[in-house]
C-alpha cells in the first residue's frame, strides 16, 4: 500500500491557451501540503489537476510535465490504478457499478488485501462525518446523492486506498461538511489539492494557485497573513452549515426563537 511511502510531485510549466510558456519555474508539492486552485470558469483549473492525475508528460492540452519524486513516473504507476498514489474526486464522479455500498467497499478491499468487515464500518462512519445525509450500508451506490458519493469516495481513499494525494475538483457544493473533510485530511497528513470557488477552502490551504487563460498566473503563499479572515469565514461557514441543515430538515427559521404563535401555526393549529 502507499501509506509508508512519501511522494513529492513536481509540476513543470506548459503553455497557456495562446501557446505562451507559463511564468513559473516549477511547483513542488510535498507530502502533507494543502493547495487550492482558483480562477474563473474556463481558466484551466480542472486541466491543471487532470495533468497531475494522469501524470502528464507533454501529452495533454497544456504541455505540462509532472514528475514524481523528481523523475518521470514509472510506467506501472501510470498504468495500474492500484499503484497510482493519486485519487481524484470531482463533482461528476459517479460509480458505474450498481452495487450496494457494502459490496462496493468490500470489492475495493479485496482488491487491496485488507481486513473487510470492520474497515467497511469505519469507512461508512467516516463518510457519514462528511455528509449531512447519512449513508445506509444496504443502499445502492447509484442511489447515493452527489454529496454522499463524494463523501464515501473521500473516506474510501483515506481508509481503504490509503491514497497519499487527493485531488478534489469543486466538491464544496451541497451536502458535504468541508471543515470536517479538511480536518480529517490534515489528521491523515494527506497531500490535498482543491479546485475551488469557496473562500473557506481557498483561504485554509497553505498555497493558492491562481489560473488565467489556461496557465498558472500566480502562486500565493499567505504564511499566516490571512489568519484573521480565516477565523471570520470559519464562523460564517459554521452558521451557514447549521442553517442549511435546519432548512433541509424542514424547520421554519424565524428571527427569534419560535414563539407560541408560530409553533401553533406550524402545527396547523389556528392561533
Ligand atoms: N493550457 C491550456 N492550453 C490549451 N487548452 C487548455 C489549457 N488549459 C485548459 N485548456 C482547455 O480549456 C478548457 C477549460 O479548461 P478547464 O480546465 O476545464 O477550466 P476550469 O476548470 O477552470 O473551468 C478545457 O477544454 C481545457 O482542455
Ligand atoms: Mg473545472
Image (tube, rainbow, N blue to C red):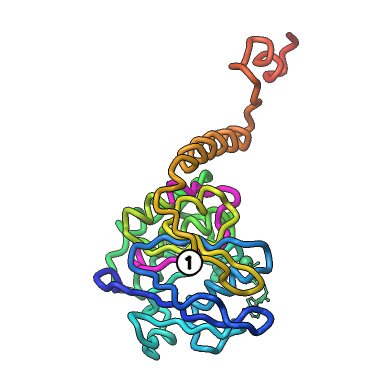
Q: Quadrant of residue 85?
A: bottom left
Q: Considering only vertical position in the picture, is 208 above or below 227?
A: below
Task: Identify the residue at horizontal 66%, vertical 62% (top origin).
Answer: 40
Instruction: Measuring from the top left, give residue 107's x and y in whole percent.
Output: 40, 70
Task: Identify the residue at horizontal 53%, vertical 58% (top origin).
Answer: 149
Q: Is residue 117 left or right of residue 264?
A: left
Q: Any magenta on residue 174?
A: yes
Residue situated in front as seen by the camera: 73 or 114: 73
State the SS at label 1.
strand
Instruction: Measuring from the top left, give residue 129's x and y in whole percent.
Output: 43, 46
Q: If the image is split into quadrants, where does the N terminus sit?
A: bottom left
Task: Identify the residue at horizontal 72%, vertical 18% (top origin).
Answer: 268
Residue bounds of the magenta highlight: 159-181
Q: Which residue is mark 1?
A: 167
Instruction: Measuring from the top left, give residue 22's x and y in whole percent.
Output: 56, 78
Instruction: Measuring from the top left, give residue 56's x and y in whole percent.
Output: 50, 84
Looking at the image, in which quadrant does ligand 1 appear?
bottom right
The answer as to whether callout 1 falls within 8 Å of ligand 2 is: no
Task: Identify the residue at horizontal 39%, vertical 70% (top origin).
Answer: 29
Amino acid at each position: 500500500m502507499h501509506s509508508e511511502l512519501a511522494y513529492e510531485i513536481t509540476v513543470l510549466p506548459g503553455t497557456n491557451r495562446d501557446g505562451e510558456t507559463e511564468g513559473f519555474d516549477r511547483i513542488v508539492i510535498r507530502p502533507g501540503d494543502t493547495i487550492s486552485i482558483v480562477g474563473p470558469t474556463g481558466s484551466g483549473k480542472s486541466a491543471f489537476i487532470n495533468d497531475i492525475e494522469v501524470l502528464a508528460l507533454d501529452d495533454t492540452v497544456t504541455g505540462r510535465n509532472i514528475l514524481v519524486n523528481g523523475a518521470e513516473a514509472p510506467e506501472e504507476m501510470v498504468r495500474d490504478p492500484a499503484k497510482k498514489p493519486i485519487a481524484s474526486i470531482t463533482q461528476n464522479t459517479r460509480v458505474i457499478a450498481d452495487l450496494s455500498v457494502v459490496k462496493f467497499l468490500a470489492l475495493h478491499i479485496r482488491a487491496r488485501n485488507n481486513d473487510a468487515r470492520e474497515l467497511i464500518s469505519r469507512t461508512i462512519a467516516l463518510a457519514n462525518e462528511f455528509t449531512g445525509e447519512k449513508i445506509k450500508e444496504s443502499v445502492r451506490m447509484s442511489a447515493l446523492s452527489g454529496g454522499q458519493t463524494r463523501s464515501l469516495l473521500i473516506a474510501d481513499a483515506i481508509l481503504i486506498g490509503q491514497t497519499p494525494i487527493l485531488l478534489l475538483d469543486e466538491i464544496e457544493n451541497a451536502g458535504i461538511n468541508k471543515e470536517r473533510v479538511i480536518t480529517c485530511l490534515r489528521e491523515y497528513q494527506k497531500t490535498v489539492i482543491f479546485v475551488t470557488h469557496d473562500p473557506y477552502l481557498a483561504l485554509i490551504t497553505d498555497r493558492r494557485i491562481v489560473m488565467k487563460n489556461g496557465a498558472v498566473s500566480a502562486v500565493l503563499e499567505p504564511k499566516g497573513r490571512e489568519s484573521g479572515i480565516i477565523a471570520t469565514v470559519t464562523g460564517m461557514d459554521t452558521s451557514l452549515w447549521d442553517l442549511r441543515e435546519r432548512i433541509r430538515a424542514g424547520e421554519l427559521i424565524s428571527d427569534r426563537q419560535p414563539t407560541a404563535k408560530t409553533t401553533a401555526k406550524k402545527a396547523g393549529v389556528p392561533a
